Image: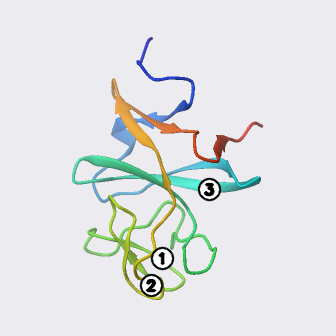
């Protein structure tokens, strides 16, 4: 099936796996020569993906695997420092890293599939 995307785009999950304000889909990426986790979420019908790394201190942010949203399901929250991030921009609006942002990973949806982009110092992990 031709998606119209070049080879830098990797399939991640069926679109139905991402629910507004719900659990994230976690995936492995290579960033700056290290294997790390990325995550994809859906918010207000749009998908976004980020490196699972707080800009304050390089720690994973989810408070349980795949859980990033605060209780009202309006913001992403770092479980360690309580920093709050806008889901679609990744910008920190509260906490110790105000004004910084999460490292974004390009993502898109085509034909009911979510894809992530391996460009910009990100690459898939080969097992």
Pick the front one: 5 or 12 = 5
Q: Residue at x 54, y 73 (%)?
A: 54
Name the disc covering residue 78, or none. 1
Number of other residues with Cα within 10 Å of mark 2, as a class: few under 14, some 14 to 19, many 20 or more: some
Residue 108 appears in which quarter of the rendering? top left
Q: Secondary structure at mark 2?
A: loop
**Residue, disc 3:** 37
Find residue 122 and report its horizontal and vertical position in percent: 63, 46
Q: Secondary structure at mark 3?
A: strand
Q: Residue at x 77, y 37 (%)?
A: 127
**Residue, disc 2:** 82
Q: Residue at x 38, y 69 (%)?
A: 91
Q: Are discs 1 and 2 less than 8 Å apart at CB?
A: yes
Residue 29 horizontal side relative to residue 43, left or right:
right
Number of other residues with Cα within 10 Å of mark 1, as a class: few under 14, some 14 to 19, many 20 or more: many
3D distance between C-alphas at marks 3 and 1:
14 Å
């Amino acid at each position: 099936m031709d998606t119209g995307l070049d080879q830098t785009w990797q399939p991640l999950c069926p679109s139905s796996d991402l629910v507004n304000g719900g659990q994230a889909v976690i995936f492995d990426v290579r960033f700056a020569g290290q294997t790390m986790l990325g995550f994809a979420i859906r918010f207000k019908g749009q998908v976004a993906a980020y490196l699972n790394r707080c800009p304050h201190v390089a720690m994973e942010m989810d408070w349980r695997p795949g859980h990033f949203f605060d209780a009202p399901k309006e913001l992403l929250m770092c479980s360690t420092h309580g920093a709050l991030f806008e889901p679609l921009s990744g910008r920190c609006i509260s906490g110790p890293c105000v004004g910084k942002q999460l490292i974004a990973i390009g993502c898109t949806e085509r034909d009911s599939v979510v894809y992530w982009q391996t460009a910009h110092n990100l690459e898939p992990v080969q097992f």
